[in-house]
Image (cartoon, rainbow, N blue to C red):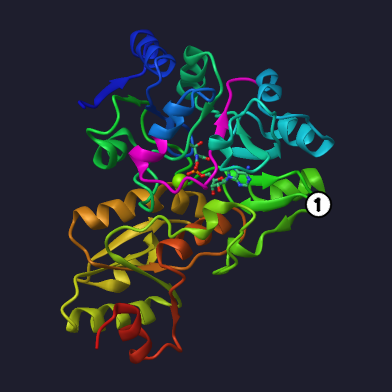
Amino acid sequence: MKTEVLEINETSLKKAGELIRSGEVVAFPTETVYGLGADVFNEKAIKKIFIAKNRPMDNPLIVHVASKEDILKVAREINTNAQMLIDKFMPGPITIVLPKRDEIPNSVTGGIDTVGIRIPEHEGARKFIEACGCPIPAPSANSSGKPSPTSAKHVLDDLDGKIPLILDGGESNCGVESTVISLCGETPLLLRPGMITYEMLCEVLGKVDIHPSVLENNKVDKAASPGMKYKHYSPKARVIIVDGSSVTAKGFYDLAKENKRNPVILWEEEELSDFGERSSIALYSNSDTRIAARNLFKLLRECDKKGFDTVFITAVSEKGAGLSVMNRMLRASAFTVLNENSSTEDLKIALQIN
Ligand code: TXA
Ligand code: MG
């Protein structure tokens, strides 16, 4: 199949709508990451999403709608907490999990009776959903396990030949996927941190619980958000988080180099000069973790393209947007964190050097 990449305009939107109504899948931009959408009521089309991405069938999809009025096409009811979040943050980079309507197929939600709902802020995304005329279930438009795509080019790199159309709406502004919060239990439960931060949620809702797997390697099989149990966001390179100073990172880098690796350091821009001739790239600057979020997936993909096989990446503060950055980095690194007390042996184990 030939994959077309088209800028968003009236003609391409019309084409995208026709493809979706005929049972095809289409990739589209959002402010978080690019999504791969299909008609929510067409089970064959939904199956195509899972096949194109090579995604496990029990990992539920987020259903995207264009307006607040359409939420009740997907959710059975809107409770008080949901209403407060809708009023404050939608459209925006947040997904609320609510009891689902019976009409929403089980293949969308991986067989569970709740559904994640999101109204994207990206105008192109909303126009696309409107052109389709139905709610659009859509995961991130990457191959399953790879870093999520933040540009049309990333989608093409992963899914060329597997989908008919990619709508190009420029680079995604947030760079990490939406905040996912379940409103089905007594206390709201943060399942995946994003740009609508934990602190922002607490301000509106009062008490919010954080699911343990947000920052821990939670081996429980039945995670509240099934997506959290899979390996995630991994480039080909081995990612190692460095929770320490640039001196510590330099030590690890040099040891990797001695062992014939081709390493790179992703660090704060202000300290890059500490690394001298070593390969290093700015992850963020001015302690602004929103910039780290915007750059993270893009840089992990770039490291692969440039042939680096080992990525040492700085830990960031878990406040604000930093929580979502740490959450994604921990998964990209398979929870590998080294600090100044880590031994040569620890690094060798992380790098699988004997
Ligand atoms: O920003 C985003 O959310 C992007 C764009 C395209 O909107 N989408 C996205 O979808 O990241 P995906 O499929 O890659 O991630 C969806 C996450 C998964 O971790 C999944 O388990 C969780 O949301 N999820 C979806 N529905 C759920 C539900 N009913 N209950 C609990 N978790 C749910
Ligand atoms: Mg994803």
Q: Nearer the viewer, residue 202 or 234?
A: 234
| Amino acid carrying mark 1 in the image | Thr
Q: Residue furthest left?
A: 260
Q: Quadrant of residue 332?
A: bottom left
Q: Which residues are magenta?
A: 49-67
Q: Nearer the viewer, residue 64 or 54?
A: 54
Instruction: Give the residue displayed 32% in from the left and 55% down from the top.
Output: 300
> Disc 1 on helix, strand or loop?
loop
Instruction: Give the residue displayed 40% in from the left and 53% down from the top.
Output: 296
Instruction: Give the residue displayed 48% in from the left and 41% down from the top.
Output: 174
Please give left or right for residue 256 compared with residue 327 in the image.
left
Report which residue position mark 1 lands on: 187
Where residue 204 appears, as percent x and y from the top left, is: 78, 43
Where residue 290 appears, as percent x and y from the top left, is: 51, 49
Where residue 228 appears, as percent x and y from the top left, is: 54, 56
Residue 318 lies in the magenta stretch? no
Q: Nearer the viewer, residue 320 or 79?
A: 79
Please give left or right for residue 66 compared with residue 167 in the image.
right
Where residue 65 appears, as percent x and y from the top left, is: 58, 24
Instruction: Give the residue displayed 50% in from the left and 19% down from the top.
Output: 129
Total count of labels: 1
Q: Quadrant of ligand 1?
A: top right
